Image (tube, coloured by chain):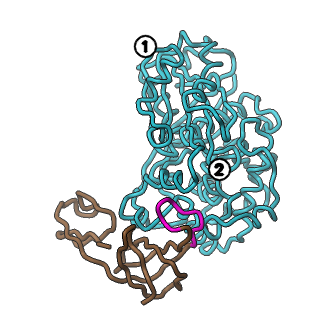
């Protein structure tokens, strides 16, 4: 998982943009994210193709940027998790 | 000002017919009556490419109706397509670019495994978020958890929206589900995205609905039952879910509703009948607050007191809503306008609200990516 950072004003966000939503400049860098803190998680039973039949969707705080992650285990709110990418997307595990 | 002068529904549900068959079924009663006067077709449909392997569907339907030379366009705005289509038709008429518009909303979605259709709908998300395995129902689950926690609302209040809307759907001959469910049945049904259960979500549906819209000046050529578009409002919110400030309030709903009420010079208190976008039951509660019908954090209390039922002080989703009527995506927002038309013209039969003169609909795209609010009035 990468977090986008505006080189001009430092604003960070997950979804790529061509223009910074805060300062309007167009110069960004990507910062790798390796860990985050669990804000909330939801167990999803009816899942979209091609994802597994059942997993937890986790809303994370990654250095004050919110991001979504998949987890095969229930993670406690407030706990720290490691983030990595598998073939489908970001997945997190207990730290 | 534009007016709605006629409406025609197909039954919503699992239908064997194709997209164009359904669209034609809903449009034909109007075309038979007024076809020669229609000079524009607005086709609300979002997923003909993904579900039906069809592009340029607006021209295919105009040919199907032998209206080959009538200009047409397709409005694709995901779940909010229908509200956008009514707003565009209103604009075409008010600008003088069209005199009388046939608005058709249609979607053919059944026939695929649920996992495949869930994937198709999730394609409206940004890839950085979608790749985590998000589905639209999972976002409703996050919203429910946040709402119950923030406002200390009972879990039962969300389920009661589904009970109410299934009751209303049981009174609607066009609804996908036409049977009631009890609170116990809702709470015992299969979990889809914890804590929300299957009865608290709309089904995957096929269906179509058509409206005849014209100018106030031309209304007398189109029968005697007209409902006026008193004001439209529209707004967007960020499509990046991780960039939103709140899980319990939808900015596009707040702003579009404020605009529609401001333009109509009316307030929420005047509305006799209201249709909201309840893809998930929690959305009805949150939208009822963001549109201004209840204070933030108090929408659940209105549900528990029965205020939002037919016969209550603030009836919401008399049609059964998306929850029970079904959610053939391109049709849903058009069907909201159709339900308000039936209510204000006194044709809503078993679900008729007494003395309904003013109405409101809220059509929402992509879990709040944008919304269209419409205020309706009149009945003459």
Vertical position of residue B7 compared to residue B321: above or below: above
> Mark 2 and mark 1 in contact (Cβ < 8 Å)?
no
Residue B98 placement (x, y as % from top left): 45, 19
Chain B painted colour: cyan
Residue B163 placement (x, y as % from top left): 77, 56
**Magenta-colored segment: predominant secondary structure:** loop
Image-based side of B76 in relation to B173, left or right: left
Q: SS for tag 1?
A: loop
User: What residue does disc 2 label?
Assistant: B203
Tell me which numbered mark, 1 or 2, is placed earlier along the sequence.
1
Report the disc number at residue B316: none
State which quadrant residue B162 falls in. bottom right
Chain A painted colour: brown
Mark 2 chain: B
Mark 2 neighbour density, 10 Å: few (under 14) some (14–19) many (20 or more): many
Residue B76 placement (x, y as % from top left): 44, 39
Q: SS for tag 2?
A: loop
Mark 1 neighbour density, 10 Å: few (under 14) some (14–19) many (20 or more): few
Q: CA distance from mark 1 to mark 2?
A: 36 Å
Which residue: 65% across, 70% down?
B195
Report the disc number at residue B69: 1
In depth, the one of B181 and B2 nearer the eye is B181
Vertical position of residue B231 compared to residue B300: above or below: above
Which residue: 70% across, 42% down?
B273
Image-based side of B92 in relation to B319, left or right: left
Q: Which residues are magenta?
A: A43-52
In depth, the one of B232 and B349 nearer the eye is B349
- Magenta highlight on residue B352: no
């Amino acid at each position: 998982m990468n977090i986008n950072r505006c080189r001009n004003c430092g604003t960070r966000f997950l979804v790529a943009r061509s223009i910074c939503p805060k300062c309007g400049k167009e110069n960004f860098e990507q910062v790798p994210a390796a860990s985050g803190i669990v804000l909330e998680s939801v167990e999803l039973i009816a899942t979209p193709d091609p994802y597994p039949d059942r997993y937890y969707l986790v809303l994370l705080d990654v250095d004050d940027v919110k991001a979504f992650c998949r987890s095969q285990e229930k993670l406690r709110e407030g706990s720290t998790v490691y983030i990595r990418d598998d073939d489908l997307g970001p997945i997190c595990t207990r730290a | 000002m534009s007016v709605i002068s006629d409406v025609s529904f197909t039954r919503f549900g699992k239908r064997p017919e194709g997209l164009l068959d359904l669209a034609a079924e809903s449009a034909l009663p109007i075309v038979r009556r007024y076809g020669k006067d229609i000079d524009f077709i607005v086709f609300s449909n979002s997923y003909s490419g993904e579900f039906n392997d069809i592009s340029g569907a607006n021209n295919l339907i105009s040919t199907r109706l032998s209206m080959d030379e009538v200009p047409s366009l397709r409005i694709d705005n995901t779940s909010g397509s229908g509200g956008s289509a009514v707003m565009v038709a209103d604009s075409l008429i008010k600008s003088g670019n069209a005199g009388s518009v046939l608005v058709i909303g249609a979607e053919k979605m059944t026939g695929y495994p649920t996992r495949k259709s869930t994937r198709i709908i999730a394609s409206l998300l940004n890839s950085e978020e979608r790749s985590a395995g998000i589905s639209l129902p999972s976002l409703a689950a996050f919203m429910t958890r946040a709402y119950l926690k923030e406002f200390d609302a009972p879990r039962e209040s969300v389920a009661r929206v589904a009970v109410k809307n299934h009751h209303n759907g049981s009174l609607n001959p066009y609804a996908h589900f036409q049977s009631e469910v009890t609170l116990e049945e809702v709470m015992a049904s299969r979990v889809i995205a914890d804590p929300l259960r299957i009865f608290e979500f709309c089904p995957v549906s096929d269906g179509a609905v058509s409206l005849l819209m014209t100018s106030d000046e031309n209304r007398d050529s189109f029968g005697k039952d007209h409902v006026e578009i008193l004001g439209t409002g529209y707004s967007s919110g960020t499509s990046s879910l991780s960039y939103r400030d709140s899980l319990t309030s939808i900015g596009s709903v707040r702003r579009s509703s404020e605009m529609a009420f401001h333009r109509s010079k009316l307030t929420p208190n005047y509305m006799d009948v209201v249709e909201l976008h309840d893809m998930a039951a929690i959305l009805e509660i949150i939208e009822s607050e963001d549109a201004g019908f209840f204070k933030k954090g108090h929408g659940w209390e209105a549900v528990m007191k029965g205020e939002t039922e037919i016969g209550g002080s603030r009836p919401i989703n008399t049609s059964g809503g998306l929850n029970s009527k079904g959610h053939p995506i391109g049709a849903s927002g058009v069907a909201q306008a159709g339900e308000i038309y039936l209510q204000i013209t006194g044709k809503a039969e078993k679900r008729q609200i007494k003395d309904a003169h003013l109405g409101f609909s809220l059509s929402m795209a992509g879990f709040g990516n944008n919304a269209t609010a419409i205020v309706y009035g009149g009945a003459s």
